[in-house]
Amino acid sequence: MIIPKKSKLTSPQLQEIENIVTEFGCRIQVITGAHQEIYAILGDERRELMISRIEGLSYIDRVDTIQSPYKLMDFRSSLAGHKVTIGKAQLGSEPVFIAGPCTIDPKNPNLFYETAAAIKEVGAHALRGGVWKPRTTPHSYQGDRAALDILLEGSARTGLPVITEIMDEAQLKEVESTPTAIYQIGTRNALNYSLLKAIGASAAKHRKAVLLKRGRHMAPIDEFLSAAEYLTAAGTPDIILCPRGTTPPLDGYRNHPDESITPLLKEKTWAPVVVDPSHSVGKALYVPAASLAAMAYGADGLCLECHLKPREGLGDDPKQAITPEVLEKLIKDCRTIWETPSRWQSRLKE
Ligand code: PEP
Ligand code: MN
C-alpha cells in the first residue's frame, strides 16, 4: 500500500509507479477515500527491490507492507482512518439504522411509500427494500424490476438514502446509474468472487457503499474479511460488514445468531459493523432483544426488516418485519446502550 506525501499522486507520478510494479508482475489499484487516495499493490507486494524503488521516490511518504490475507481490510491498513457514511450519518459516530421491507410489493407501491414515511419519522437513517430476491426455492416470488422505481421514489419522497440487494451483473448495470446509495451483497453471494469484483469496481466508480452480509454457512471471520477484501481491492473503501446469522440454526431461530462476532471483527478490521438481527432470529418477536444484544456487542448500527403492515408484506415480512412503532422504541433503547461506558471498553485496543 503506497501512501503519497500529498493527498494524491499526479498522473505522471502514478504512471512512474505503475511502470515499476509492472516489472515485478504487480498492478496498482487506486482507492479513493474521503481525504486521501491510497494505492494498493496487487500481486506480491513483498518484493524488496520493488518496495525500495518506490520508497526512494521523492513524492512517496511510505509503503506499508502488511502480512495479512486481507491487508486492505486489516486494522493495521492505511485505510484504517477511513470513515464510511450513510447519508449524513458517519458510522462509528452514532448508532445508524437501516430499515424497510424485505421485499417491495410492486402491486402496492403506496404501502411502501407509507412504510418509508413512517420509518423516516421514527429516526432511521436509510431505507431498505428488496427489488430482486434470492429465494431458497424457485417457486417463491423472485422480485421485479418495477420495484426499483418504487424504491427510488420512496427515497425521493423521504430524502432517505436507499439500499437494495444485487445478485448479478445485469442487476448491477440497472442499479449503478440510479441514486441508490448502498449495494447489498446477500449471504448467498458472499463468496461469489466475480460478483464481488464487479460490485467493488462499480461502487468505486459510482461512489456507492457496499453492505456485505456474512456467508450463512458459518463463514469463518477470515473468510468474511477476505470477501470484503475483494471489494476493497476493486477500489472501494466504503464497506459495511453485516453479520446476519449462520446455519445450522439455533433450535427455534431461523439461523444461529452471530452478533457476538462483532468484537472479533472490531479487533481485526477498521470497517464498520452493521448487524442484521431480522434474518438472524427470523421472527419479529425476537428482533428487539437481538438488536439490543448487537448494540451491546459494539455494533455501529442495525439493518432491520420493518413494515407498516407485516402481514400484508411479501418474502420475509410477514414473519420477521417489526413495525415502525417497535422500531421507534428500539432506536431509543439502542441509543442508551450506545452510550454505555462498558460498551466502549470492548472497542479499546491495547
Ligand atoms: C434480505 O436482506 O432480505 C436477504 C435476503 O438477506 P440475506 O442475504 O441475509 O438472506
Ligand atoms: Mn429478507
Image: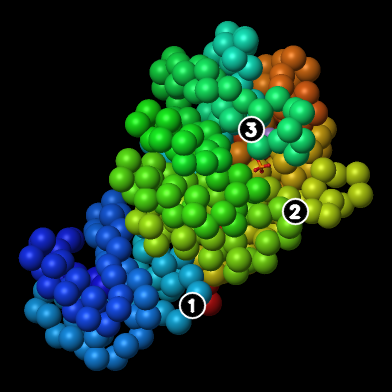
**Mark 3: which amino acid?**
Lys
Using the numbered discs, state the Cα–Cα distance from disc 1 to disc 2 in whole angstroms.
25 Å
- In percent of width and height, residue 350 lies at 53, 77
Q: Quadrant of residue 38?
A: bottom left
**Mark 1: which amino acid?**
Ser
Q: Does ligand 1 reach within 8 Å of label 3's beta carbon?
A: yes
Q: Nearer the viewer, mark 3 or mark 1?
A: 3
The answer to whether residue 348 is above or below residue 133 is below
- In percent of width and height, residue 308 lies at 67, 17
- In percent of width and height, residue 122 lies at 58, 23
Q: Return the residue at label 1.
A: 68
The foreground one among 284 and 342 is 284
Badges 3 and 1: C-beta atoms under 8 Å apart? no
> Residue, x 32% and y 41% (percent of image)?
206
Using the numbered discs, state the Cα–Cα distance from disc 3 to disc 1 in whole angstroms.
34 Å
Is residue 172 in sight in this rendering?
yes
Question: Who comes first in sequence, dot 3 or dot 2?
Answer: 3
Q: Nearer the viewer, mark 3 or mark 2?
A: 3
Q: Return the residue at label 2.
A: 246
**Mark 2: which amino acid?**
Thr
> Residue, x 67% and y 21% (percent of image)?
307
Q: Return the residue at label 3.
A: 133
